[in-house]
Amino acid sequence: MLRFLTPLPGFAVMLLTPSLAIAGDLELHVVDQMGKPVADAVVTVKPAAGLPNRPITFPWPLTMVQQNIAFNPHVLIVPVGATVPFPNKDNVRHHIYSYSKPARFNMKLYGQSEVPTYTFRTAGAVALGCNIHDRMSGFIKVVDTPYAAKSGHDGTVRISGMPGGNATVTIWHPMARTPDNEMVMQVALGASGVVSKPVSLTLRGM
Amino acid sequence: MARPSALFRALIPRRWLSSLSRKITLFYGALTVITIVLIVMGMRYGIASYAEATINQEMASGSAVFERMAAMRYDQMQQAGRVLSHDFGFRTALATGDAPTIISALDSLKQRQGIEQAMVVGLDGSIVGYAGHLNKDFRDDLWKALDGGAQKGVVQLGSKTYAAVAEPIEAPTLIGWVIFANPVGSDELTDIARLTALDMKPRIMRVADLGHGIPVTKAGSNSAALRNVDGEQMLVQAIPVTNFLPNSHMGPRVLVLEYSLSKAMNGYMPLIWLVVGLGVVGVALAVAGSWYLARRLTRPITALNQAAQRMSMGEHAHVTIETGDELGRLATSFNRMVDDIAERERQITHLAFHDALTGLPNRTLLRQHMALWLAHATPAKQRALMCLDLDNFKSVNDTLGHPTGDALLCEVTSRLIATCGDSFVARLGGDEFAVVMDDDLRSPTALARDILAAISQPFLVNGHRIVIGTSVGLAMAPTDGDTPMDLLKNADLALYRAKSDGKAGYRYFETGMDAEAQERRLMEIDLHDALARSELELHFQPLFGLSQNRVTAFEALLRWNHPMRGSVSPVNFIPVAEETGLIIPIGEWVIREACRIAASWPEDIRVAVNVSPVQFRSNSLNTIVLQALAASGLEPGRLELEITESLFIDNVEGTLASLHSLKAMGVRVALDDFGTGYSSLSYLRAFPFDKIKIDRSFIVDLLSHDGATAIIKSITSLAEALGIETTAEGVENVDQLDILRDQGCSHIQGYYFSRPMPASEIGRLLKLNTENRQNAA
């Protein structure tokens, strides 16, 4: 049961770091077994050429807001080591918890006055729940690669600036009906240009 | 299918059905039995249908109850599962892999909620909390089911069947499932079954084990199937149950409800037996009632039948009238008929033994009476039988008519009864009567005389004064015969003798009479053939005219030359011929033959022919005379018919009319045997006879009696005065001739002059006669 009282200092740095990649792009179109576009599918790419030796940054805020009795965003991609604040913008209190192996914590009943934080040190998927509100569900995907993004409502996810060559592409989705909710595939990335692939996921509860 | 009547005949002996009451009883008994059987069958069918419908309904509602109960129990367990799965501590324990905590939590929940089995299946397929062993296949199946979203259903755990629910555990994502399971063995189902009206033996079984023909239906539907299980009618309903493991090797399963219709029907059996019992009573009542009714109906018929049988045996059988209905009226009619028949029988019997006209016993009854009466007759004490025959009764019938004749017979009967006292009077037929004497006071002779006297008194009948007489023949029993027939025959012979003796008298039977009767009968037979055999012959006796001194005529006299008897005297056979009626053909032959022969004689010689009264009365005489004259060519004036006075006794007017018609033909008529019998001068006045023949008895007396001459004298004077010729018969000597000549007799006939001769000798006689006369002249 950890309580994060303050945000991590490096948080803003990562947010501001621009991507320097100049290599090829990967564009996946994620659909479910019914052929419908799947949003919030997290795609991580690990090129065989290796990862750049620098801190991982993403262009989205690494904050998990609770608003309208829901996690916002529903799925948040954070790099390993990121400290994520959990601000409560509802006027009810929440009790956020996670029993996921990468990060187990409890943030017992807190309101707007305090913002707990948690530093994710292990890559993996962290399922968030609220002990008060069972229907609240959110995910934090802790990644150890800068090549990560999630699909939009049109099911399209695009990752740019990756070196060419083979790459292990992992597609994760909280509802994916696969071990660890993820699907792994090898993709040959071009030195430049876009490799576009359709991805079909079998989702639970469909 | 045989007709009912044929069936009856096959089952029941025909003899048994010969009674109407049995038939009626059997018919109504059978009708009632059929009715009762139909009622029972209908009732059974109705009950079965009703029971089936009711059970069906009950099963439908029962199955609905089952489903509701099952849902309720599932809900309860799900509720518990949901509570558990959302318990933060439990989730924490599960998320952190704290197995002992999980097990203890499950145990405490099992106790609290009364759940037998509780376990947690992790998302990775690990199972925590189940005490027994679950093999790998099962675990895989279980995980797949849970992963496929299985929430509840029936599952086999170990040897028991459980109803299980699964509730996902999310922390917050799905990390596993909590499974609660309660057994649904027979005990549990039976507990539920108690909630329904019927014990439907609920059990869960595989569809594969379900018998053929049982449809799997939705709970609550009325579609139980009827199935025969070991002779028991079972209503079975199969409701599908959800398998927890969709791919279970058990296959689809069903909840089977069944109820024995036979058992349900058994509940109604007392009712059916009650109806059957009442039916038996009803049949007994119907049989008894129709038997009683049929007996009531047939008893009078039987009585009538018996009475009819008794009647046919001659009894006077009356039937007792008990009712006023149709049968009573039939009995009344029957009794009336019996009386009428008895009365008619009496009349017929009376007619059979009595004479319809006089009411006297007839010949049959006479014989019967005589048979009894003869038993009392002994030689020492003889008894008399009289046969009576009225004299001249025929002429009464002929002249006054039969009604008068019948009335006369009745009068005669009255006098006979009055005269005979206690003796038995019978009418033998016609004018014949018989008297069986049973009178000790009078002798038979006295009674015969009394009878003669009584009948000889004049009768006054229908305004006619009638004088008749009777003849009586007597036969004595047992001397003259010991049987009715012999006695009657002999009395009849005596009567005949009395008749031939001159009527109005009585005669006793004598032994000779019988022989005479025989003789007569033989003569009758021979006489019958005499004409055909040409045994008859005419002889002629000349009549000498004293004034002419020559033969003036011949009297034709009949001779019978019998081949055995020789010449038979007319005295003997003429009466026989008259009695038998043979005189008619014989008489005809005589007239024709006489005419034929006479035609050859000189024209001044006539032929005289005797006419019998019997012949005279026959209507054919005139015709015969005409034919004989025509055939011979003889002049009518040369034929002289001789008749006797007796003709006038019976029927004066008829005789006169016949005589006149003969006379009109020109035939001469002579009165024969004048002076005997009922000679009456009035005849001479009434009819213009051509000749009188003075009877030979007067001629015989001429020489011995002085008065005889005077009589001859007076006769000849009278005849002369009336213009009638006279012939004296039987002249045998010259003395007689002289007297007759002196007294004025015109003709003589007799042996003195000539015996009768054959026709062949006549010519010689006539020649001699002429010569004599010429010589004399």
Image (cartoon, coloured by chain):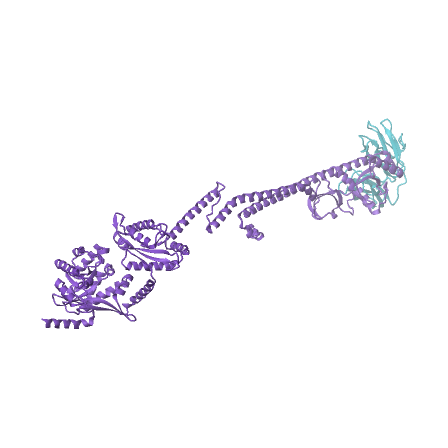
Q: Which residue lies most toward the left here?
A: B777
- Residue B474, position as x, y percentages in the image: 34, 57
Does any portion of residue B721 appear in the rendered image?
A: yes
Q: Is residue B80 above or below residue B438?
A: above
The structure residue drawn at horizontal position 29% and vertical position 58%, both measured from the top left corner, is B499
- Quarter of image, res A158: top right
Depth check, front residue: A189 or B747: B747
Q: Does residue A38 sit above or below B730 in this rendering? A: above
Residue B184 left/right relative to B661: right
Q: Residue B398: where, in percent of width, then height?
A: 26, 54
| Residue B549 spot, x, y in % from top left | 12, 67
| Direction from residue B652 to residue A161 in the image, left or right | right
Quadrant in the picture for the C terminus of chain A: top right
Which quarter of the rendered picture does the N terminus of chain A lie within? top right
Where is residue B241, by image quadrant?
A: top right
Foreground residue, B122 or B338? B338
Front residue of this view, candidates B158 and B230: B230
- Give me the chain that's purple: B
* Nearer to me, B202 or B422: B422
Quadrant assignment, res B575: bottom left
Q: In the image, what residue occupies the spot 23% across and 66% down?
A: B590
Q: Colour of chain A?
A: cyan
| Total count of labels | 0
x and y, in percent, of residue A91 in the image: 82, 27
Question: Is residue B95 visible in the rendered structure shown here?
Answer: no
Horizontally, residue B290 falls left or right of residue A69, namely: left
B416 to the left or right of A184: left
